[in-house]
Image: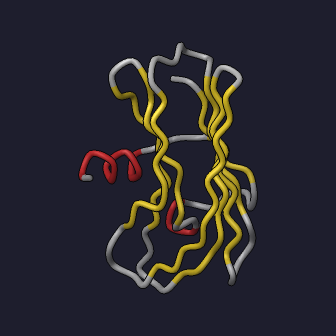
Amino acid sequence: MLKLLGALAAMTSSFTGTEGQEGAAQPVQLVAQPVGGGVQVTVVGASKQPYAAVFSLEVTSAGNRSVHRGSVSLTGGEPATLSTVTLGNVAPGQWRAHLKVEPQSCQAYEQVRTSF
């Protein structure tokens, strides 16, 4: 979990939505990290203030597609893992993860991760 939170804090990625938003303004984040010959894609939520949203995660790889949808209600303080997808034996350039977040109280945003 600490490794995942470190990746969350240090991540650099492509964002779409409100330009200039920082991770603090986007409490639901998409984190990808290599595991063995594959990749683990995780949706993590963390907020100091109460935060509610719905999210959709679409992960594609070599013609396969997985979609995870859910709602989140963060109460502040503790990070939460909202969804995890692990892809085994994926070659570089062969996977993509797309997260859409629709908060109740601010503008929607998206995050995309692709192969390392």
Percent of width and height locating residue 82: 47, 61
Residue lying farthest to the top in this orientation: 91
Q: Is residue 15 left or right of residue 75?
A: right
Percent of width and height locating residue 3: 27, 45
Colour convention of the picture: secondary structure
Query: Residue at horizontal 71%, vertical 60%?
Result: 109
Does 11 sit above or below residue 37? below
Percent of width and height locating residue 61: 63, 26
**In this figure, what is the number of numbered marks?**
0
Occupied quadrant, residue 53: bottom right
Does 63 sit above or below residue 17? above
Query: Residue at horizontal 69%, vertical 57%?
Result: 100
Query: Residue at horizontal 54%, vertical 74%?
Result: 72
Does 61 sit above or below residue 108? above
Q: Is residue 103 left or right of residue 27?
A: right
Percent of width and height locating residue 23: 52, 60
Does 23 sit above or below residue 51? above
Q: Depth check: give the residue in front, 63 or 76.
A: 63
Query: Residue at horizontal 56%, vertical 60%?
Result: 22
Q: Is residue 79 left or right of residue 103?
A: left
